[in-house]
Image (cartoon, rainbow, N blue to C red):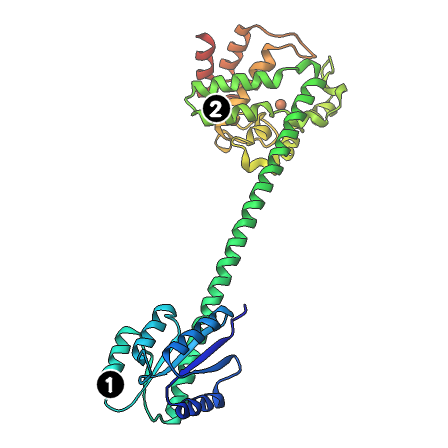
Amino acid sequence: MELKKGFILCVDRDQSDLKKLSEELHKFVDEFEEIHEAVSSEQALDLIYRMSQKGQDLSMVISAQDLPGIPGVRFLEMVHQKFPKSVKILLSGNGQLEDAVYAFNNADLDRYLKKPWVPEELEFAVSSLLRQHRMERINETLFNDVQVKNTELQATLKQLKTAKHQVETSYMQTIQSLAIALEAKDTYTAGHSQRVAKFSVAIARAVGMNAQDVEAIQKIALLHDIGKIGMIDRILNKPGSLTEEEMVLVRTHPAVGGQILSPVRHTLKFVDAVQCHHENFDGSGYPGGLTWDQVSDGTRIVRLADAFDAMTSNRPYRIAQPLSYALSEMKTYSGSQFDPEVVKAFIMTLEK
Ligand SMILES: [Fe+2]
């Protein structure tokens, strides 16, 4: 924070009073304020203009009422219009109280001192008013600094948000590419994620989800098996049944998927469907053995869509089952593996 230098302007037609005033001010005013003199309002206004051009702040005007040309109160009124924050002191002779009243009302006069002034009174008035003026200027400068910093902070925050969004978008694009790569390497389940997404969308619509949620569920269903990306092809494409060890490995894919998506999990609705799509309605699934109230609607839907596609498409260990089989299985396991409401909605859709 840097305060601009200030100046005090003394105005009086009486040169000896002017000199005396200036000398007294020099005794107690610090170097931060320059002290200038003028013998008329016109000269004072010209000086104020030149000093302002140099970037100096008019801290205070001490003006006599008796000036050639424009009188003191009118001059102070003009100063007030241009520099409302400057301190204004009127020096006036006896019997000119009405001038002071005029200046209090029209020029926001701060102090009225009778000529000849008492040096202690002058010092007290000038020092206290100057201190107050400087505090106001410091506050104003601080406030402006805070405003500038705040604006800079807002701009930085915006840039950070944009950068974060770009990072998240590019992360999502990478994951989506991985999902496509997964489909390509897992020959038997090629198209599985797309079909699960398609069935999930159909179920989501059947249960009355809004368009935004339907879109979210489509996105997450496409990624539900992303955790299989690190699994060796030998296991993914094994024609026979898996050994216990291999089974343990395969069962890690929901948790691995959850980890892969964790950096962007706040951007994806129903993201738990990746980690929980092998959880069951009655809590008998894996990896968490979660009950149905612990998972999202998205998970309930992807769970059924995934199982349905597993039954009705060719797998390394068996050929595709007919639709009637899948319908019967879904009914059998409704309420144990699957959410009964989701099953009901899906069967109605399939039978249409
Ligand atoms: Fe899976």
Q: Amino acid at mark 1?
A: Leu
How far separated are the C-alphas under marks 2 and 1? 82 Å
Q: Secondary structure at mark 1?
A: helix
Residue under the point 44% across and 16% down: 345
* Residue 156 percent location from the top left of the image: 56, 50
The kind of secondary structure element at disc 2 is helix
| Residue 117 % position (x, y) | 35, 92
Disc 1: CA contacts within 10 A as few (<14), some (14-19) or many (>=20):
few
Q: Is mark 1 within 8 Å of ligand 1?
A: no
**On the rendered structure, is 336 left or right of 18?**
right
Q: Is residue 90 left or right of residue 202?
A: left
- How many circles with numbers are drawn on the protein? 2
- The quadrant in which the C terminus is found is top left
Residue that numbered label 2 is attached to: 214
- Residue 284 figure quarter: top right
Name the disc covering residue 1, or none: none
Q: Amino acid at mark 2?
A: Val
Label 2 or label 1, whichever comes before in sequence order: 1
Q: Which mark is residue 97?
A: 1
Classify 192 as above or below 82. above
In depth, the one of 149 and 332 nearer the eye is: 149
- Rendered position, 50 above or below 178: below
